[in-house]
Image (spheres, rainbow, N blue to C red):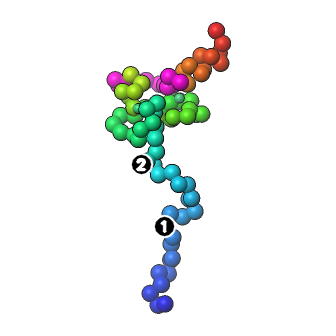
Amino acid sequence: MADRDPDGSVSGGSDDEEEDEEGKKYCLCQHVSYGDMVACDNPSCRYEWFHWNCVGLKSEPEGRWFCPPCTEIMARKKGK
Ligand SMILES: [Zn+2]
Ligand SMILES: [Zn+2]
């Protein structure tokens, strides 16, 4: 009883998300993140992060970058 930790902090807090960052799948290939990654600038992108290889990048894109699926969706929305 006397050895009870006074600040009794519970590790993890109230975050009950099950998703483990390390196990999260990204990219068109649905693999975990590794090596160089690029983020899609579409906030509603379903993948968010991509391996450079998978999207044909050889270097960091300048400015905004949209993944192939988002590029296609936006092209369709714009019409024409
Ligand atoms: Zn990939
Ligand atoms: Zn995207």
Is the magenta region chiefly helix, strand or loop? loop
Q: Nearer the viewer, mark 1 or mark 2?
A: 2
Pointer 2 residue: 22
Q: Is residue 7 part of the magenta span, yes or no?
A: no
Q: Are marks 1 and 2 in contact (CB under 8 Å)?
A: no
Q: Which residues are magenta?
A: 57-69
Residue 39, x across and y down, in percent:
47, 33
Residue 11, which numbered label?
Answer: 1
The residue drawn where x is 66% and y is 12% is 79
Q: Nearer the viewer, residue 7 or 55?
A: 55
Q: Please say whether residue 36 is visible from this viewpoint.
A: yes
Q: Quadrant of residue 50?
A: top left
Residue 77, x across and y down, in percent:
65, 18
Q: Nearer the viewer, residue 51 or 42?
A: 51
Residue sitting at the far bottom? 2
Q: CA distance from mark 1 to mark 2?
A: 18 Å
| Label 1 neighbour load within 10 Å: few <14, some 14-19, many 20+ | few
| Label 2 neighbour load within 10 Å: few <14, some 14-19, many 20+ | few
Indicate whether 16 appears above or below 25.
Answer: below
Residue 59, x across and y down, in percent:
35, 25
Residue 64, which numbered label?
Answer: none
